[in-house]
C-alpha cells in the first residue's frame, strides 16, 4: 500500500514539475498559433483585395492567397515549435522525405496543376468562349487548376483534365461563329436576283450579326445546279439553331421571286446496245 502511495506521489510530483516547466511554454505556443491564424487571415484578405485590383485571373488569385496564408501559418508554427524547444532539423528532414513520397503518389494531380497554371497564364481561351479540343467542343464554363469545364450544345457538361489540353491542337471560336448555308439554283436562273433575295433573308434575321458582314456568293457549279452560299456570323448560342429558319425562308423567297431550285438530275446513255429483232 505504501509503495502504491509513493508511486502516485511521484507521478503527481512529476506532472506538477512538467506543468511548471512546460505549461508557460505551451500557453505561449497556443497564443502564437492563435495570433498566427489571425495574422494569416488578415494578410490573405489584404492579398486578395490587392490581386483583385490588378484583375488577376480568379484561379491564380485563389492559389496565391492560399499560398500566402499557408506560408504565414507555417512561420508562426515554427515560432511555436521553437518556443517549445522542438528540434526543427529532424522534423524538416522527415517532412522532406514525406513530401517526396506524396509527390510521387500524386504526380497526375500535380501535372494537372502545372497544366492549369499554364492555361491560366497563357490564356489560350477564356470563360464564355467556344472551343474544340481533344475531340469535344463546347462553351467554356469554368477554368480551374485541375480541369476545364465545357457546356456542350446538348446542355451536357464536359470536364477535361488540364493535362489532356496542354500540347493538343486547340480550335478557339471565341464568342461568335460563322455558319454556312447553301442552296442550288437552276443554270437559267437570274443569279443577281437570287443573291439579293438570299442576302435580304440573312440580314433580316435578328440573330445574324451586322459585323463581321455576312458573305453571300456563288460557291460552285454543280452537275444540275449552281450552288449559292451564305456565310453569316452569329453568336455561339445561336449557332446551329439559326439554319432551319433561314433555309425555310430561303426556299419561300426564291420561289416568290421566280428562282428555280432544281431537283438533282442525271442523264443515262446506253452505248453499243444490240438492235432488237
Image: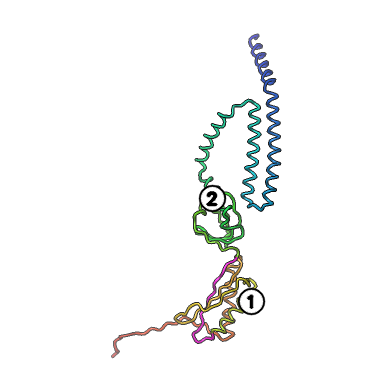
SS at badge 1: helix
* Position in image of residue 228 (x %, y %): 52, 78
x 62%, y 42%: residue: 67
In the image, residue 186 above or below residue 7: below
Considering every residue shown, the one lying at the far top of the view is: 2
SS at badge 2: helix
In the image, residue 225 above or below residue 2: below
* Position in image of residue 262 (x %, y %): 50, 83
* Front-most of residues 191 and 250: 191
x 61%, y 60%: residue: 128
- The residue range painted magenta reads 176-190
* Position in image of residue 186 (x %, y %): 50, 84
Identify the residue under disc 1: 204
Foreground mark, 2 or 1, reads 2
x 69%, y 51%: residue: 53
Identify the residue under disc 2: 115
- Disc on the earlier residue, 2 or 1: 2
* Front-most of residues 157 and 52: 52
In the image, residue 54 above or below residue 35: below
Q: Is residue 5 left or right of residue 93?
A: right
x 67%, y 16%: residue: 12
Instruction: Specify whether residue 277 is painted magenta.
Output: no
Specify the quadrant of the image occupied by residue 209: bottom right
* Front-most of residues 235 and 35: 35
* Mark 1 crowd level (few <14, some 14–19, many ≥20, 10 Å Cα): few
* Mark 2 crowd level (few <14, some 14–19, many ≥20, 10 Å Cα): many
* The disc label shown at residue 111, or none: none
Amino acid at each position: 500500500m505504501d509503495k502504491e502511495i509513493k508511486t502516485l506521489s511521484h507521478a503527481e510530483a512529476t506532472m506538477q514539475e512538467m506543468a511548471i516547466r512546460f505549461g508557460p511554454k505551451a500557453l505561449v505556443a497556443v497564443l502564437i498559433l492563435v495570433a498566427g491564424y489571425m495574422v494569416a487571415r488578415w494578410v490573405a484578405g489584404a492579398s486578395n483585395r490587392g490581386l483583385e485590383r490588378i484583375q488577376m485571373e480568379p484561379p491564380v488569385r485563389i492559389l496565391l492567397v492560399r499560398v500566402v496564408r499557408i506560408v504565414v501559418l507555417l512561420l508562426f508554427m515554427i515560432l511555436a515549435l521553437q518556443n517549445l524547444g522542438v528540434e526543427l532539423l529532424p522534423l524538416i528532414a522527415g517532412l522532406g522525405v514525406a513530401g517526396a513520397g506524396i509527390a510521387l503518389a500524386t504526380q497526375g494531380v500535380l501535372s494537372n496543376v502545372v497544366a492549369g497554371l499554364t492555361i491560366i497564364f497563357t490564356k489560350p481561351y477564356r470563360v464564355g468562349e467556344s472551343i474544340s479540343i481533344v475531340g469535344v467542343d463546347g462553351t467554356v464554363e469554368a477554368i480551374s487548376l485541375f480541369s476545364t469545364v465545357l457546356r456542350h450544345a446538348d446542355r451536357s457538361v464536359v470536364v477535361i483534365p488540364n493535362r489532356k489540353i496542354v500540347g493538343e491542337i486547340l480550335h478557339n471560336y471565341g464568342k461568335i461563329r460563322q455558319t454556312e448555308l447553301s442552296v442550288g439554283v437552276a443554270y437559267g436562273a437570274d443569279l443577281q436576283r437570287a443573291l439579293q433575295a438570299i442576302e435580304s433573308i440573312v440580314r433580316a434575321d435578328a440573330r445574324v450579326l451586322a459585323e463581321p458582314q455576312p458573305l453571300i456568293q456563288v460557291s460552285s457549279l454543280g452537275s444540275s445546279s449552281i450552288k449559292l452560299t451564305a456565310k453569316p456570323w452569329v453568336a455561339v448560342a445561336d449557332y446551329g439553331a439559326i439554319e432551319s429558319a433561314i433555309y425555310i425562308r430561303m426556299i419561300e423567297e426564291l420561289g416568290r421571286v421566280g428562282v428555280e431550285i432544281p431537283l438533282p438530275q442525271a442523264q443515262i446513255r446506253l452505248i453499243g446496245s444490240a438492235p432488237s429483232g
